[in-house]
């Protein structure tokens, strides 16, 4: 039984509608995610800025109190000029000019008041020395302490509200009088700190409070509810995070908590904002986004039907035409029927596929050749036999005390290695390439005891011209081992660089034994047999020639001239490209 067939128009319309719907849904999810994250980050940043501002204001206020402390400390050091009554008068002037200061007292280590702006102090000295602010100051060895809030009842003053006590150890007296250790006490009206914190708003129900370094609450706007037990604060979560921003759920509501350290007080200021208030506009955004997505899906179904009709109508006409020519002879099958139009498309597609496969095969072969050439070049960088002989020569010179020769040969060998590696670069400057050759020739010249000489001529204008690295040294090596090595007289290698229009020519010539014409003609021919050559001579030249053609094109590469008993000259042709920066730092 045949399955139910569905028209292309229906399939296309359904597929397009589903794709567009899926794309819209994914877009909506991504947009909602990004918007939610951005809004959360912005909200946290805004709340953090508020807490930072409150913290700064609190820091300014504390610095102001410390300034008052420094003033009192300075007064206590000039007792030879000021009497106790005069010091008291000056401190009382400060108290009367400010609403936030309750009293300033200087006490001796036994709790007796030396200077006091509060004449009604009546707490026994033994009880004063037991007060937390007194003990912390005495044990703190000069540190400053803020203690509070706490009820201060050292006097019969009618003021009975909570205070914050600033206390520290000072020296009372100067060089003309006996100096003694004393405790400075400044009691602050707690309302001053409260106003700084209640003036900041974190949404409608957010709040800011302060805790001490031991986790005790210094100030909380809901202190009465905390005292009655009708409200509990998340002190444990604050202790876990110590500093920074985090989001947690506490008391059935998700909330943002910002924690900062208050300078010089060992307090931490904590801001609490509720996420449902901060993110109130997010719900409206989501409702709008859902409405837009629904509308877009409806439009997607409508437009997918129209577009599918527009696309499939030519196929319907083609189908009618295919039925009229269904007995035609086509070389390639076409799904859904046969027609000249579809056969032409199918044939073109088949030709295209075959051509692509041929091109890919050519690319694979080219890449394989290139990788092989690069491997050959890498393997040719360091000849183990050359390295062994060089090190053996270094040992011999060291044993004979030829220190200068050792230094010269090791330096040349180091430069040779440095340019061979060239930090992984395949292209270096001509100056660096020829420096590599110079180092190689210096080593060989010392090894062969000056059996040959060499010269290198590089115009200054071409020093920074780029070139594929390691293309000259193998040619020079061939000149030594297959040309000059067999001479009875002194050999000579000449390297000359010149510019010809848009090309650079590098000519390496020697006065060696040369080679016959049949050997010369086979050196750069990849298809030639080299069974008549020894020691791999010619493989390096073909390698260089292939590398140059791969990098620069078929019009560049090597050319060789040679004559028996007269010498050989190899010319390298490369394009003259824009100068580059040297890639190797040479050391002498």
Image (spheres, rainbow, N blue to C red):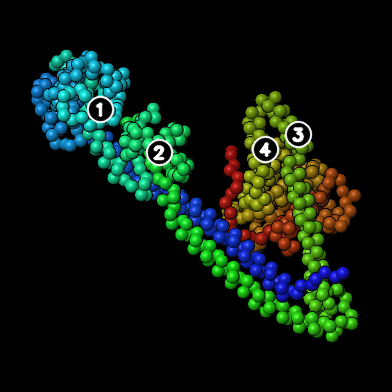
Q: Is residue 184 left or right of residue 213?
A: left
Q: What is the CA distance from the residue labelled 2 to the residue labelled 3? A: 68 Å
The residue carrying mark 3 is: 388
Up the image or down, 506 lies above or below 184; here it is below
Image disc number at residue 259: 2
4 or 1: tag closer to the N-terminus: 1
- At a point 86% along the width and 45% down the height, the residue shown is 534
Q: In terms of depth relative to the viewer, which is nearer, 459 or 246?
A: 246
Mark 1, secondary structure of its residue: strand
For marks 4 and 2, the one nearer the N-term is 2
Q: Nearer the viewer, mark 4 or mark 1?
A: 1
- Return the disc, 1 or 3, that comes first in the chain's sequence: 1
**Tag 4 residue:** 413
Real-space Cα separation, disc 4 to disc 2, in angstroms: 62 Å
Element assignment for label 3: helix
Which residue is denoted by mark 1 in the rendering? Answer: 151
Of the two numbered discs 1 and 3 in the rendering, the one whose residue sits closer to the viewer: 1
How far from the left and from the top, in percent, is residue 568? Answer: 78, 52
Mark 2 near mark 3, Cβ–Cβ under 8 Å? no
| Viewer-side residue, 586 vs 424 | 424
């Amino acid at each position: 039984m045949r399955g139910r067939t569905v028209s292309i128009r229906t399939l296309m319309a359904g597929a397009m509608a589903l794709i567009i719907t899926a794309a819209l849904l994914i877009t909506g999810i991504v947009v909602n995610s990004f918007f939610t994250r951005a809004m959360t980050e912005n909200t946290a940043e805004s709340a953090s800025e508020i807490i930072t501002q409150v913290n700064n204001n609190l820091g300014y206020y504390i610095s102001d109190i410390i300034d008052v402390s420094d003033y009192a400390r300075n007064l206590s050091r000039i007792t030879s000029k000021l009497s106790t009554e005069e010091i008291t008068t000056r401190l009382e002037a400060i108290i009367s000019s400010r609403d936030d200061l309750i009293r300033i007292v200087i006490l001796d280590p036994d709790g007796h008041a030396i200077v006091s702006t509060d004449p009604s102090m009546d707490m026994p000295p033994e009880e004063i020395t037991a007060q937390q602010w007194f003990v912390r100051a005495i044990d703190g060895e000069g540190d400053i302490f803020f203690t509070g809030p706490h009820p201060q009842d050292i006097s019969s003053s009618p003021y009975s509200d909570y205070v914050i006590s600033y206390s520290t150890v000072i020296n009372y007296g100067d060089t003309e009088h006996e100096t003694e250790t004393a405790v400075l006490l400044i009691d602050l009206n707690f309302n001053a700190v409260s106003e700084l914190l209640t003036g900041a708003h974190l949404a409608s129900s957010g709040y800011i409070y302060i805790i001490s370094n031991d986790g005790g609450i210094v100030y909380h706007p809901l202190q009465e509810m905390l005292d009655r037990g009708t409200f509990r604060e998340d002190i444990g979560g604050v202790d876990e995070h110590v500093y920074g921003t985090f989001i947690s759920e506490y008391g059935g509501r998700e909330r943002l908590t910002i924690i900062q350290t208050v300078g010089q007080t060992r307090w931490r200021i904590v801001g609490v904002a509720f996420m449902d208030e901060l993110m109130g506009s997010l719900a409206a955004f989501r409702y709008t986004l859902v409405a837009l997505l629904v509308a877009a899906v409806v439009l997607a179904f409508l437009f997918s039907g129209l577009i599918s009709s527009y696309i499939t109508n030519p196929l319907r006409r083609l189908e009618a035409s295919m039925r009229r020519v269904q007995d035609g002879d086509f070389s390639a099958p076409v799904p859904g029927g046969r027609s000249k139009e579809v056969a032409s498309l199918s044939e073109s597609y088949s030709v295209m596929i075959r051509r692509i496969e041929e091109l890919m095969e050519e690319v694979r072969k080219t890449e394989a050749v290139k990788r092989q050439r690069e491997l050959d070049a890498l393997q040719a960088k360091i000849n183990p036999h050359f390295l062994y002989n060089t090190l053996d020569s270094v040992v011999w010179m060291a044993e004979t005390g030829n220190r200068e020769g050792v230094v010269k040969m090791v330096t040349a060998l180091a430069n040779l290695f440095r340019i061979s590696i060239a930090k992984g670069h395949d292209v270096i400057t001509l100056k660096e390439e020829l420096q590599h050759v110079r180092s190689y020739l210096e080593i060989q010249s010392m090894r062969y005891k000056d059996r040959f000489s060499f010269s290198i001529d590089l115009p200054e204008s071409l020093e920074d011209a780029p070139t594929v690295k390691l293309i000259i040294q193998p040619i020079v090596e061939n000149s030594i081992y297959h040309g000059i090595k067999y001479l009875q007289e002194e050999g000579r290698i000449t390297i000359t660089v010149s510019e010809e229009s848009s090309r650079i020519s590098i000519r390496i010539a020697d006065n060696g034994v040369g080679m016959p014409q049949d050997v010369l003609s086979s050196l750069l021919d990849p298809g030639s047999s080299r069974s008549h050559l020894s020691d791999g001579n010619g493989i390096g030249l073909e390698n260089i020639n292939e590398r140059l053609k791969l990098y620069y094109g078929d019009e560049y590469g090597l050319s060789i001239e040679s004559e028996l008993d007269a010498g050989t000259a190899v010319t390298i042709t490369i394009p003259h490209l824009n100068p580059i920066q040297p890639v190797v730092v040479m050391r002498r």
